[in-house]
Amino acid sequence: MRELLVLGPLNIEFGSLSVIVDRRLRIRWVVIIAYSILLIVMAVLPSRVVATVADIPDWISHALAYGLQSGLIYWGLVPITGWRWALVGAFLGTVAFGAATEIMQLLHPGRSLEFKDLVADAAGALIMCLVIVGVGRGLHRGIE
């Protein structure tokens, strides 16, 4: 028996996987994709433009931006995969996205790949994942 992944008008066969994506989940992913596009735009803008937008140290802006992205990805994955895999997916997805945006900067004049930015991206993602775990534990303690 074949199962379908239902994405609005689009149905995709995935063997035995069956997930029906409801309207709320689609809205979550629209937010995640919109935010990711914003990060890409910020990554390819000339660095002098980005520096005027945020008057905070570069590493802090990277940690905040990619920490938020990690939280958003977790929010999008948790209804599909459960909290553990959503956490793994959020962290790895954010780090991979950060690496991709750093590599993308090599193709744009006035931008350069910086390893410290990737470390800040990963640190922001890790901090957000730790916050999610801490908040989750706190909620469970309140229930028990």
Image (cartoon, rainbow, N blue to C red):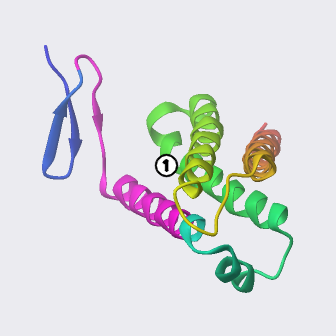
Residue found 63% across the figure and 69% down from its top? 110
Task: Specify the quadrant that holds the N terminus.
Answer: top left
Q: Specify the farthest residue to the front.
A: 109
| Nearer the observer, 48 or 52 | 48
Q: Residue 48, image x and y in percent? A: 70, 80
Magenta-drawn segment: 15-41
- Magenta region's main secondary structure? helix
Task: Specify the quadrant that holds the C terminus.
Answer: top right
Residue found 22% across the figure and 17% down from its top? 15
**Is 38 colored magenta in this rendering?**
yes
How many numbered discs, if any? 1
Q: Secondary structure at mark 1?
A: helix
Residue 10 in the figure: left or right of residue 31:
left
| Nearer the observer, 59 or 29 | 59
| Nearer the observer, 123 or 78 | 123
Q: Specify the farthest residue to the right.
A: 57
Type of the residue with mark 1: Gly
Above or below: residue 62 compared with residue 138: below
Q: Residue 40, image x and y in percent? A: 52, 62
Instruction: Indicate the quadrant where residue 84 lies.
Output: top right
**Is 34 colored magenta in this rendering?**
yes
Q: Which residue is mark 1?
A: 76
Q: Residue 22, image x and y in percent? A: 30, 51
Residue found 65% across the figure and 82% down from its top? 49
Q: Label 1 neighbourhood size at 10 Å, few (<14), some (14-19), many (20+)?
A: many
Above or below: residue 68 compared with residue 143: below
Residue 9 in the figure: left or right of residue 136:
left
